[in-house]
């Protein structure tokens, strides 16, 4: 059933009109998922605490505004499969149950990545690097166990995450060192065998770097030429108020969309802080002198109205562009529910106070929320 029929079939269209103001003042407003029900899914990444019900205000926002959820960390190898013979499924079971209770489009993130993957994965009992067969068997076991457990319940998977470097070559990860390019093909093969009905995605960031974008396009063409089951490509979208220019994003959305796959904005957040490359070496703000601390952490208490307006205009601009390409984009997922949760507070500069999301640290909607809904209405 085409995505749009699924979304508009969901039973909550007019509910909010019947319910009085909620504790975080968002119930009177149109819901994000309602505003885009004929365009694309609207999702959010959930933290462990939110999944365990430790943030009721966050869950109210999630159930009100979003019709898709992604786990921020609990399905990453080190979290869900910390030891060879030990899986940690309890939080994932709760995540999937939360999604099913709200009839949401549930995403799995991520099966094969160079980060948050324990060293033991690549070593034998004696600590020596595994050979090709042994590592393939270990990857297969991991994917079959996890994708198999949530077969028919997790609708789409980020099978491989961030495997292309800025020069467009494949990242020299431990997966690549032992398995070569095959690790990507095999990961998709195993995931498709484990759940033939699940959508399978390749997920990446910094497509603005031309050689990297060309490298991803080459990779997708290679996978397609080998009949690898691939449904979509994720554009993470870790952006800034003034970077990248909208035109630069469109400059890669168009060629990517020519690959006959769905495009998704999978990890959207717009930092309110000055530009600082996201994959820089992680440092602590206290290691900067006072002047640089002021420059890189200018809003430790609250975001000035003028910057709230800049952020709102930026989000409106982005969503107007997403709507323009609604025929290519099937989902837009925010990489947190609220400002306090966002990784932009601690990566790449630890100890900062960023304000990148639509909801503030008390789950109160920010002007950016209204700006996006206005963009939706304008796009109708
Ligand atoms: O789970 C441990 C906890 O046991 C320990 O007490 C705590 C103390 O340090 O650390 C916790 O692990 C943290 C983990 O998040 C779970 O909260 C890690 O230190 C921390 O590094 C990790 O950060 C995550 C980061 O990926 C790791 O690379 C961020 O929350 C998460 O937002 C971020 O998400 C990635 C996407 O998966 C892929 N694309 C980029 C995006 C941003 O880096």
Image (tube, helix red, strand yellow):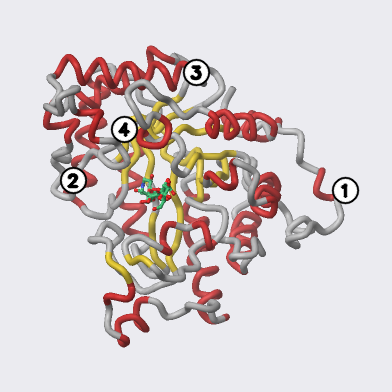
Marks 4 and 3, how far apart at CA: 19 Å
Ranked by sequence position, the earlier of labels 2 and 3 is: 3
Residue at image mark 3: 149
Distance (Cα) linking label 2 and label 1: 50 Å
Pair 4/3: label in front: 3
Check mark 1 vs ligand 1: CB closer than 8 Å? yes or no: no
Question: Which badge, 4 or 3, is on the more N-terminal residue?
Answer: 3
Secondary structure beneath dot 3 equals helix
- Residue on which disc 4 sits: 160
Numbered mark located on residue 18 in the image:
1
CB of mark 2 within 8 Å of CB of mark 3? no
Horizontal side of 18 relative to 70 (left or right) equals: right
Tag 2's secondary structure? loop
Element marked by disc 4: strand
State the separation of the CA atoms marked 4 and 2: 14 Å
Residue for badge 2: 165
Above or below for 194 versus 170: above
| Residue visible at 50% across and 33% down in the picture | 107
Front residue of 358/340: it is 340
Residue 106's place in the image compared with 279, above or below, is above
Residue 46 spot, x, y in % from top left: 54, 45
Report helix, strand or loop for mark 1: helix
Q: Which mark's residue is nearer the viewer, 1 or 3?
A: 3
């Amino acid at each position: 059933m085409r995505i749009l029929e699924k979304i508009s079939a969901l039973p909550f269209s007019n509910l909010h009109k019947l319910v009085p103001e909620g504790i975080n003042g968002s119930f009177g407003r149109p819901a994000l998922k309602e505003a885009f029900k004929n365009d694309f899914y609207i999702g959010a990444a959930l933290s462990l605490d939110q999944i365990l019900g430790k943030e009721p205000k966050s869950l109210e926002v999630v159930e009100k505004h979003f019709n898709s959820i992604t786990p921020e960390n609990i399905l990453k190898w080190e979290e869900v499969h910390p030891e060879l013979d030990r899986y940690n499924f309890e939080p994932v079971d709760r995540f999937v149950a939360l999604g099913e209770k709200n009839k949401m489009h549930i995403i799995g993130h991520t099966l094969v990545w160079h980060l948050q993957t324990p060293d033991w994965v690549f070593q034998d009992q004696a600590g020596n690097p595994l050979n090709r067969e042994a590592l393939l068997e270990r990857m297969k076991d991991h994917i079959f166990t996890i994708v198999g457990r949530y077969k028919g319940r997790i609708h789409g998977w980020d099978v491989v995450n961030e495997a292309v470097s800025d020069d467009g070559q494949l990242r020299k990860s431990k997966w690549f060192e032992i398995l070569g390019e095959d690790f990507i093909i095999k990961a998709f093969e195993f995931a498709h065998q484990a759940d033939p009905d699940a959508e399978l995605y390749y997920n990446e960031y910094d497509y603005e770097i031309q050689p990297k974008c060309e490298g991803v396009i080459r990779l997708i063409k290679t996978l397609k030429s080998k009949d690898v089951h691939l449904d979509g490509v994720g554009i993470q979208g870790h952006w800034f108020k003034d970077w990248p220019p909208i035109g630069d994003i469109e400059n890669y959305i168009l060629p990517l969309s020519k690959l006959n796959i769905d495009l998704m904005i999978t990890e959207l957040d717009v930092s309110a802080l000055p530009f600082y490359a996201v994959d820089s070496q992680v440092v602590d703000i206290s290691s900067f002198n006072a002047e640089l601390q002021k420059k890189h952490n200018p809003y430790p208490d609250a975001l000035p109205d003028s910057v709230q307006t800049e952020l709102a205009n930026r989000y409106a601009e982005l969503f107007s562009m997403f709507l323009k390409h609604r025929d290519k984009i099937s989902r837009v997922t925010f990489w947190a529910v609220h400002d306090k949760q966002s990784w932009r507070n601690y990566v790449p500069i630890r100890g900062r106070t960023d304000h990148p999301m639509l909801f503030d640290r008390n789950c109160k909607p920010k002007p950016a929320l209204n700006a996006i809904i206005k963009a939706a209405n304008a796009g109708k």
